[in-house]
Structures are given as C-alpha cells and as structure tokens.
Amino acid sequence: MCRAQQPAVYLLSSPQLSKCNGFLPTLQVEKLRHRAVRGPKVTQLVRSRAGVQTQAAEDVNVTFEDQQKINKFARNTSRITELKEEIEVKKKQLQNLEDACDDIMLADDDCLMIPYQIGDVFISHSQEETQEMLEEAKKNLQEEIDALESRVESIQRVLADLKVQLYAKFGSNINLEADES
C-alpha cells in the first residue's frame, strides 16, 4: 500500500555537528543539509560569511498553529506587495487624468469636440462635458486608491500582530523582515 509522503524538513542535527567540532567544509554542509529529518523539532543551520563555520541554534517545536501563522504572514506579505503595485498603477492613471484636465483647460477653442475613451470606443464631447467626465473619473479613481490604501493598512496591522507572536515564540530562529533585493 502506498503511503502519502510527508514533506521532508532539511536540517543538520546537533549530533552531526558535535562530530565535527562545529566546523564543516562547505561541501559537507550542503550534503548534510539535504538529509531529510522528520519530526516536530527544527534545528537551524547558521553559516559564517566565509561559509565554513556552522553552529546549531536551539531546538524549537513548530506546531500546526505556528505553521498556519507563518503561512498567513507569507500570504499577507504577498498581498501587500500586490496591493502596493496596484496602487502605483492607479496613481499613474490618476496623474494621467489630471494631465488631461490641465490640457483641456489650456485649450482656447470652446466649440472644440474632444474625444473621450469609454471602454474601447472614443466618443466626442464638448470641452465642458469632457471636463466633468474627467473630474468624475478622478474622483472614482481616488476613492479606489483610498480603499486600497486602507486595505494595506489593515493588512499591515495583522502582519505586525503576527510578527509579535512569531518572534515571541521563535526569537532569532525566524526571519520575517522583507529582503531589500
């Protein structure tokens, strides 16, 4: 009977380290790092900048609830990134609408028909009607931006709460800071 494989956790256990007095060449570290160790205890492997010295951190029990919190943190971090990108796109659209409003104001000819895009179609309107439509579009876009920013703030509050909980349990054994690269 085929049993479902449990995901392997790749670790370097403390007994393996003690055999080598805490020093392993880089290639041995990579080999040992890829040995699958199953169980609820996690040992973190730390390498120095030179890449050869290692030391084992304290054992930490990772419960199902802890894993759920870590997963929730990762999902929310990803969602914040997506929302911030969406906000930037909408801000660019808002700037384009403001530029269009400025250009229409500078137009001298009041009887000029200005094409306004609705979906895939351009419809010609008077300067005044186009100005009103642009103002309405700017207002709607600003409301969308405000809603997205409030969602980002609420997610950031959730992330701050999760950070406190996870750092309280795992301390320096977990890194929840965003990479700058």
Image (tube, rainbow, N blue to C red):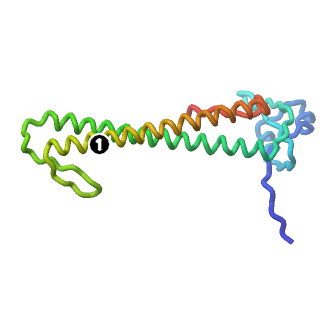
Residue at 65% over, 32% down: 160
**Residue 154 position by quadrant:** top right
Observer-nearest of 168 and 47: 168
Whole-percent x and y of residue 150?
A: 50, 36
Type of amino acid at the residue the image marks with label 1? Glu
Whole-percent x and y of residue 7?
A: 78, 54
Labels in figure, total? 1
Categorize mark 1 by other alpha carbons within 10 Å: few (<14), some (14-19), many (20+): few
Q: Secondary structure at mark 1?
A: helix
Q: Is residue 152 left or right of residue 45?
A: left
Name the quadrant of the C terminus.
top right
Inspect this view and state whether residue 12 appears. no
**Residue 120 position by quadrant:** bottom left
Inspect this view and state whether residue 84 appears. yes
Name the quadrant of the N terminus.
bottom right
Mark 1, residue position: 136
Q: Is residue 98 left or right of residue 70?
A: left
- The outermost residue toward the bottom is 1
Whole-percent x and y of residue 138?
A: 31, 40
Residue at 81% over, 31% down: 54
